Image (cartoon, grey):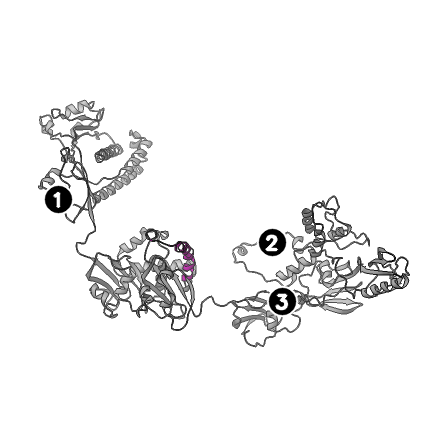
Amino acid sequence: MKFIKFITALLFIAVATASIAQTGSKNVTPTAQQMEQFKKLPEAQQKALAEKYGIDLESLGLLGSSGNKSEKNNEILPSSILPRDLESDEKEELTDEEKFKPKEIELKPFGYELFSGEPTTFAPSESALVPNTYIVGSGDTFSINLYGKESYNGEVTVDREGRLAIDKLQPVNVAGMQYSEVVELIKHKVEQEMIGVKAFVSMGETRSIRVMILGEAYKPGAYTIPSLSSISHALFVSGGLSEIASLRKIQLKRSGKVVQTLDLYDLLIKGDSSDDVILKPGDVVFIPAVGKQVTIDGEVRRPAIFELKGSESIEELITMAGGFKAAAYPQKTLIERFTGNSSKTILQLDLTKAAKYSPKNGDKINIPKSSEQLDDAITLLGAVSYPGNYSWAPGDKVSQLFGSLKSDLLPIADYDYGLVVREINEKANIEVYQFSPINAFNKKANSDIELQPRDKVVIFSRFQTKEEEEEALKSLALTKEQIELQDRIKLWDKYEEKLFYEFIDLGGALEKELAEQLAEEESKKITNITDYLNNQKKELKESDYSLFSREKLLKPIIAKLNQQANYVNQVKMFGIRGEVRFSGVYPLPENATVKEAIAAAGGLKESTYLEKAEITRYSRTEGAALNHVVVDLNKALSSDSADEFKIQSKDSISIYPIPNWQKDLQIEIVGEVRFPGVYSIRKGESLSSVLERAGGFTEFSYPEGAVFTRESIRFQEQQQLNKLSEDLRRDIASKSFNSSITDSSLSYADMNSLINDLAKVKAVGRLVINLPAIEQGTQHLPLQNNDILYVPTKSNSISVVGEVNFATSHIYNPELSFDEYIARSGGYKQRADEDRIYIIKASGLVEIPNQGSWFSASKKEQLAPGDTIVIPLNTEHVDNLTLWSTATQIVYQMGVALAAISSL
C-alpha cells in the first residue's frame, strides 16, 4: 500500500527533517527549537540526521532521547512504543509439510499496516499553522511584536486562570476563546492603551493536553499529547490498533457523548481527513471491535480483507480493492459464503451487469484471471525477422505476413517449407498445413493458405546444424542490422519453444518430456523407416542443431500428433529417407503428396534417380500387411494431382540414387613415381592404370617394398586391436588371484604398461601387394576411395629384431646368411626360439624358412634388401600374460617400422 506508507512517512519526518536541513552545513550546533524537534523524531531518524550534519548525539545527550521530558511543562511525553513486528523476534518453525507445500500469499486486513513497522512516538510539528478556530487555553504561548513609538519582542504564556498578561497592558482573560479572537483582542488593546504602537501577534508553543485512548488500541491508556493533535495523532501515540480493531467506526467522545466518528477508509482510500478533528483536553478516543468483514482476492489491485460499515454494494467493494486489473474476468466472479449449517456455498456473479448482491460477514470474493489465449490473433515463429503475435481478420492469408522475403525472413530461412499449425477442437488437437513461403509470397493458391484465429505459422531454417548455418552466414555479405538480428534470434529460441509447447498443450516440463519420448518410440515403429534415421539423430547433440532446424521445431509438433492419435485417428506422420537433404520423420500435412514430402525433407540431392521411388505403406485392413507402391518422381514433381501421389499415415518413402552414381573418388600416390600426388579415379579402376597416369616408377624406386593402405582394412584392423585390448583386460582380471601371475616376471606396473601400450596402437590398414606384378599387368587390384600407395626408395639394409642381444639393422650383403646376420646382432638370447624364426619381407609378406634347407645355401637367397628377421620368444615355459606382452611388442614394432617407411 504505497499511499499508506506515504502518509506514515509524511506524518513522522517531513517537518522535522526540513527544519534541521535549513542549517545548510555539517558540524553545526542545533538551536533550542531544533533540539525540541529533534527529540521528537524516531531514534533511527535522529542517527541519520546526526550523521548527515555532523551532530554528536552523545555529547548533546540526545542518544535515545525519544520521549524525554518537556522543559516547559515538566511533563513526560509518551515514551516510544516499539513497532509490533519488532517486539517479538521469535519465528515459528515450519513443519516438514509446510516446507514442501507451495507457499500461499495470506491476505491481511486492509489498513492495519499503517501502524506497523514504524516507531509510534509522534507529535504535530510546532511550526505547523494554527487554525483560526483553535481554542486557546492555559499553557499556550503567544509571540508578540510591538512596533511604532515603542518596540517590544517577547513571548507571553496563558496562565492557569486563563489570563494573558502583556507588559504595560492590563491582563485579559483569553481561555476558551478562538485563536483569531485572541489575536484581534490583543491588537485592539495595544492600539487603545499604547498610542502610536501597533502589534503583530502569532502563536508560539501550544499547550499539552491529556486524552484517553481506549478500546482496541494497541496500548490503551491516558496520554499527554500536543493540543494540535487530531484523532489520527492519538492513534499513533497509542501504537495503533489491535488486530481486531475497527478502522471504520473510531469514536471521539466528549463529556460522555459521541461528537465525531472517524472512518479511516476515507483517509486511506480517498485521502479525506475532514473527520479527523482536533482533540480537546479530556477527550476519549474509543476504538470498537471490528464488524463484518469480506475478503476480495484475485485480479484486483488491492486484494485484502475489508471491513463493512453498512450494506455496501459490490461496486463499492471493488472500489475499496482498487478496481479490476487489466487481466480480470469479472463475468465469472465467485463468492464463497458460509451457510450457517457447518458448510459453505458458492455464488457466481457477472460483475459487468447489475448484480443483486448483499455482502455477508465472511464472504470471500474471487475475481478470476482471463485466459492467456489470444483471440483474433496468429503467431509467427521460427526463422523470421519479427517473430511474435499478429492481428487476424477474416480472409487473412499467409502472404499478408511477409511484405518482403528479404527483410521479413532471416538469411537462413527455407523458402520452400513452412507449416501452419491449427487447433481443430476443444481438446486442443492439431492439424498441420504445409506451404512454400516463396509461393505464398507470390500468392500461389496451394501455398497462400487462408489463416484462422490462433494459427501458428512456423518458418524453418534450411540448415540442420549450427555449424552448417554459421559457415553459410560467413559467405553472405550481411549488413550490420542483419548481424545484430542473428544475435537476437538466440534470445527468441527459449521464448518460442515455451510459446509453442503451450500452444500444443505440452506446457508442463514432465508432460513435454514424456510426450517427446512417446513420439520418439512411435517414430521407430513407423513401418520401414530405417534404423539409420534414428542412428543419425544420435550422432548429434541437442545443442548442435540449428535454433530453427527441423529437428528442433518439429519435435513438439510430432509429440502432439503422437499424443492425440488413437484407434480411430491414426498418427499423422510419415517417413522419408534416401537421396534427400534431411531424412527423418515429419508431420503429415492435410492433403499431402509426394511432392510436399520431398519439400519437407529439404529437396532432392543431385544423385536422385527420378525414374523410380518406393512408398512402403502399412495396411490395417489386411492384417498389418506391408504394401509397396512404385512412384515415378518425374511425374510426382510435375503433377498437380493430389489423389494420384497422395501419401498416408505411416508411409515410408524411399528415394534411390542413380545406379553406379558416385562422388569424387581419390587415391594418393607418394614416393618414387614421376608424378606423385592425388588422383581422381572412376569406380573399379585398377592400380596399374593410375600408375601409368603417374608416369611410372623413378630409377630410385623399390616397388618390391611398396606399402599400400586401405581405409576399410584399417577400420577392421582397429576393431581387432580394440578387441585384443579388451580380451587382455579380462584375462588379467580373471587371473588377478592366480598364483601364476605372482610367479611370472610381469609386475603390476608391467601389466598396466602392457595394456596402455596396446590401447595406443593405431591400425594402419596395410594390404600386402605385389606391385611389380600389378605394374606389369599380371595381377589386377581394383581401387577404392582414399587408398594410399607408398613407393619407397631402394633399401640396402636387413633388420634383426626379437630375442637377440642387440636388435639393429645391417647393410645388405647377399653373401651373408641368417646365422651371420644374427651373429652380427650379438647372437640369440637364452629364451630365443630358434625353431620359429620368420622373415617379414619388405612387401609385407611373412615367410617361414624351410627347416630342411635352413642350413643350406638357400638361406642367402631368401633374404632381400628391406627384409626383417624376427627371432621370437620361446613360450613353452612362459604363462599367457608374458606371451601377450611379447605379441604386443611385436605389433608395436611393426607399427613403428611402417611409420618409418611412410615417412620416406
Residue 848 part of the magenta-drawn span? no
Start-end of magenta stretch? 476-501
Identify residue type, mark 2: Glu
Q: Check disc 3 and report the residue beneath it.
A: 306
Tell me if 270 is positioned left or right of 741 in this view. right
Residue 689's tag is: 1
Q: Is residue 340 visible?
A: no
Depth check: give the residue in front, 851 or 265: 265
Identify residue type, mark 1: Ser
Where on the picture, by quarter, is residue 868?
top left
Tell me if 887 is positioned left or right of 229 in this view. left
Q: What element does badge 3 sit on? A: strand
**Pointer 2 and pointer 1: residues touching (CB < 8 Å)?**
no
Q: Earlier in the sequence, mark 2 or mark 3?
A: 2
Residue 496 part of the magenta-drawn span? yes
Q: Check disc 2 and report the residue beneath it.
A: 92
Mark nearer the viewer, 2 or 1: 1
Q: What element does badge 2 sit on? A: loop
Tell me if 678 is positioned left or right of 177 in this view. left
Number of marks in picture: 3
Depth check: give the residue in front, 245 or 903: 903
Q: Quadrant of the N terminus?
A: bottom right
Q: Position of residue 690 (x, y in %)?
A: 14, 43
Q: Earlier in the sequence, mark 2 or mark 1?
A: 2
**Pointer 1 and pointer 3: residues touching (CB < 8 Å)?**
no
> What secondary structure is the stretch in magenta mostly built from?
helix
Q: Quadrant of the C terminus?
A: top left
Q: Residues within 10 Å of mark 3 (few under 14, many from 20)?
A: many
Question: What's the residue at 57%, 54% (across, down)?
Answer: 94
Identify residue type, mark 3: Phe
Q: Position of residue 214 (x, y in %)?
A: 74, 62
Q: Earlier in the sequence, mark 1 or mark 3?
A: 3
